[in-house]
Image (spheres, rainbow, N blue to C red):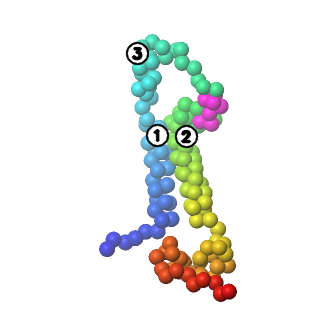
Amino acid sequence: MPARISMKAFVAVAVALAVGLAFAVSPYASSHPDGLERVAADKGFAEQGRLHRIQHDAPVPDYAFPGIDNPRLATAVAGFAGTLTVFALAYGIGFVLRRRATGPPSAARPGGAAGGGSPAASPLAGGPPAAPPAA
């Protein structure tokens, strides 16, 4: 049987790997235009394009972290920051959704702090139903 690792260890390794790859590989991304930019240039309407107003205030314009003069380092830091930002957002959304799905313990639910039941007694846990309260 293969050894099991904890979820915290898995997440830590996955984040470290993603951030390391983003930092190390992003400076080597192609400087050639992407497909849409290439078609616009080939068809002669690339110069007519305009930035959307939200793009003027982008935190990391053109995939280069502002204030860093070395273009490769600026791109690497942008990859690092972007990867951490996406992870933080995903973690936060997961945390909120998990809290919303389970909710805080209450007296109304079996297994809650004031309920006196155990999680095994919950019908959702597949155990025997909880005994009705004494009248």
Say whether disc 2 or disc 1 marks the residue closer to the N-terminus: 1
Residue 64 highlighted magenta (yes or no): no
- Marks 2 and 1 in Cβ contact (< 8 Å): yes
Identified at 37% across, 72% down, the residue is 3
Say whether disc 3 or disc 2 marks the residue closer to the N-terminus: 3
Quadrant for residue 82, please give it.
top right
Q: Position of residue 129 (x, y in %)?
A: 52, 80
Q: CA distance from mark 1 to mark 3?
A: 26 Å
**Dot 1 lies on which element?**
helix
Q: CA distance from mark 3 to mark 2?
A: 29 Å
Amino acid residing under circle 1: Ser
**Looking at this view, is 36 or 135 the one in front?**
135
Q: Position of residue 90 (x, y in %)?
A: 54, 51
Bin the neighbour count of mark 2 within 10 Å (Cα to Cα): few under 14, some 14-19, many 20 and up: many
Residue 56 highlighted magenta (yes or no): yes
Vertical relation: 35 (above or below) 98: above
Q: Which residues are magenta?
A: 54-60
Identified at 57% across, 45% down, the residue is 81
Q: Position of residue 91 (x, y in %)?
A: 56, 55
Which residue is tagged 1? 26
Identified at 42% across, 31% down, the residue is 30
**Dot 2 lies on which element?**
helix
Amino acid residing under circle 2: Ala
Q: Residue furthest bottom?
A: 134
Which residue is tagged 2? 78
Amino acid residing under circle 3: Asp
Which residue is tagged 3? 42
Identified at 60% across, 83% down, the residue is 132
Q: CA distance from mark 2 to mark 1?
A: 8 Å
Query: Closer to the camera: disc 1 or disc 3?
Result: 3
